[in-house]
Image: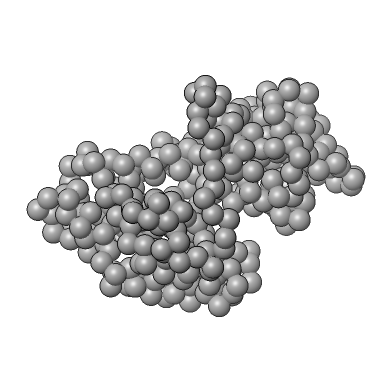
Amino acid sequence: MFEHAMTNLRRIRKSGAEEIKVSSRSSITDLRSGIIQVDAFNGRPPECFGVIGGPPCPDFSSGGKHRGHEGDRGKLSQTYIDMVCSLCPSFFLMENVPGLIRFKKHRDYFLTLREQLHDAGYVTDFATLDALDFGAPQERKRVFLVGFSHKTLREARPGLELPTGEGWFPFPKPDFEDALGYPWPGASKFGAEPKRPRGIPDTLMTISWLKDVGVTSGIPNSDEFFVPYSDKFSTVDEGDDSRKSFKRLHRYRYSPTACYGNNEVHLHPWEPRRLSVREALRIQTVPDEYILPSNKNLSAKFKMIANGVPVVLARAIARSLMNFLVGEIDHVNNDA
């Protein structure tokens, strides 16, 4: 699905763009750094390259069973860090849920991973960022761990003493400093016409992203959704996201974290159905040119969407990394 969507996006924006191909579909547990170097670089890595990824997070999630690094998925965080240390990239980025540092037993594990990276010649920093603060219509907090090799840092910042502690990396600043503090409305009876509140930026409300992408809009993936089968689709209040399932969005609020699985996709604010594939992509701020193939399983599509980082947040972090590497940030606080 990734190949199809990325190829389509590139070719819509640039005629004749090269087809996107995933070089390996093997599990990271079955790969070795030498194999990756051959697949990605024909055996010879470039002078500057990075590793970016987000190991599975359910074992660290607040809603999970807290198996942590002992869980089948939690173990992959160690595998990811082992791979970083083996590949020796110029920089790396790891994304995960806030539970990785919020709960003591998970945080202790996180700190051991960080110490392993330090021993391997990296300086690291981390921060918790919320996609809502960056213009996504969704509250989605995630932890980002970033690191640079000593060599890369010295080249990017000649004469800089290697940073220690936290707070030295210029993570992106939010577009909205206190997005949760706006006068968000409460729930409304489904089918009613709730009053639009004042003082809330349009981009943070779901209506701005959903109003033009209905089932008959003709936008790709907009007519793909799970068929309603329960009376709850017509009875749950607009904005009632208090329950574990059948959470309904509010047109003038942001969405809860898009965490879809087992057909459990958020309900549409004013229609008696779940969100469509395109609407879920919109909540993740994915551009409409990113089109998922029509012949793929719906559950697989929603799972892929829910695993992603909202584009507005990913872009902000990418810019911070690029600015840091090319030296556009003038100062690094080494006293933090």
Residue 334 as seen in the image, left or right of residue 316: left
The vertical placement of 11 against 45, above or below, is: above
At horizontal 64% and vertical 33% (from top left) the residue drawn is: 291
| Coordinates of residue 335 in the picture (x, y in percent) | 18, 59
Does residue 166 appear in the picture of this structure? no
Q: Which of the image's four quarters has the C terminus? A: bottom left
Residue 245 as seen in the image, left or right of residue 198: right
Query: Residue 217 is drawn in which quadrant?
Result: top right
Q: Nearer the viewer, residue 318 or 140?
A: 318
The single residue placed furthest to the left in the displayed view is 159
Residue 80 as seen in the image, left or right of residue 19: left
How many discs appear? 0
Query: Residue 177 is drawn in which quadrant?
Result: top left
The vertical placement of 90 against 220, above or below, is: below
At horizontal 38% and vertical 75% (from top left) the residue drawn is: 112
Does residue 39 appear in the picture of this structure? yes
Residue 20 as seen in the image, left or right of residue 108: right
Q: Nearer the viewer, residue 185 or 279?
A: 279
At horizontal 45% and vertical 43% (from top left) the residue drawn is: 314
| Coordinates of residue 82 in the picture (x, y in percent) | 41, 69
Query: Residue 11 is drawn in which quadrant?
Result: top right
| Coordinates of residue 45 in the picture (x, y in percent) | 33, 53
| Coordinates of residue 267 in the picture (x, y in percent) | 75, 42
At horizontal 18% and vertical 60% (from top left) the residue drawn is: 162
**Colour pattern of the rendering:** one colour
Q: Which of the image's four quarters has the N terminus? A: top right
